[in-house]
Image (cartoon, helix red, strand yellow):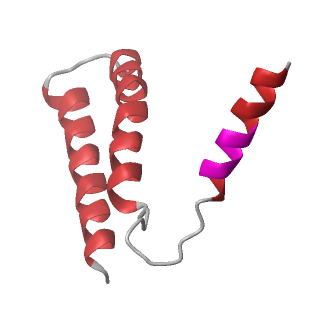
Amino acid sequence: MSKTTKIVLIACVLVAAALGAALFVFKLPINTVLIGLMVLVCPLSHVFMMKFMGHDHGGGGSDHSHCEQTKELSGNANKS
């Protein structure tokens, strides 16, 4: 099992434990817990995505056509 997989697995177990504690120990209504999870899903998914979905900018000969495309689009906008 890779290191990334272990980290994600541990995070899922911790979330499940926190969910169980919120429901049974603190006796929060399930609606409140689900709304709280929904609020946290977006920023947490962005953090994990930026951390684990590699973006290799260090290699030689990498394709930066999106930079050229942006210059071309801005040039076309100025012509109009």
The image quadrant of residue 65 is bottom right
Between 65 and 31, the one nearer to me in the picture = 65
Residue most toward the right? 80
**Which residue is drawn at the image coordinates 37% and 50% (left, top)?**
50
Residue 70: give x, y in percent of width and height.
66, 41
Residue most toward the front? 79
Viewport quadrant of the C terminus: top right
Residue 35: give x, y in percent of width and height.
40, 19
Between 78 and 47, the one nearer to me in the picture = 78
* Numbered circles on residues, count: 0
**73 on left or right of 64:** right
Question: Which residues make up the magenta segment?
Answer: 67-72
Between 69 and 79, the one nearer to me in the picture = 79
Residue 33: give x, y in percent of width and height.
33, 23
**43 on left or right of 10:** right
**Which residue is drawn at the image coordinates 53% and 77% (left, top)?**
61
Picture layout, residue 11 above or below residue 35? below
Picture layout, residue 42 above or below residue 29? below
Residue 36: give x, y in percent of width and height.
34, 22
Prevalent SS, magenta region: helix
Instruction: Check residue 27 for magenta coloring.
Output: no
Picture layout, residue 7 above or below residue 27? below
Residue most toward the bottom? 1
Viewport quadrant of the N terminus: bottom left
**Which residue is drawn at the image coordinates 37% and 22% (left, top)?**
30
Residue most toward the left? 25
**Which residue is drawn at the image coordinates 60% and 67% (left, top)?**
63
**50 on left or right of 68:** left
Between 48 and 68, the one nearer to me in the picture = 68
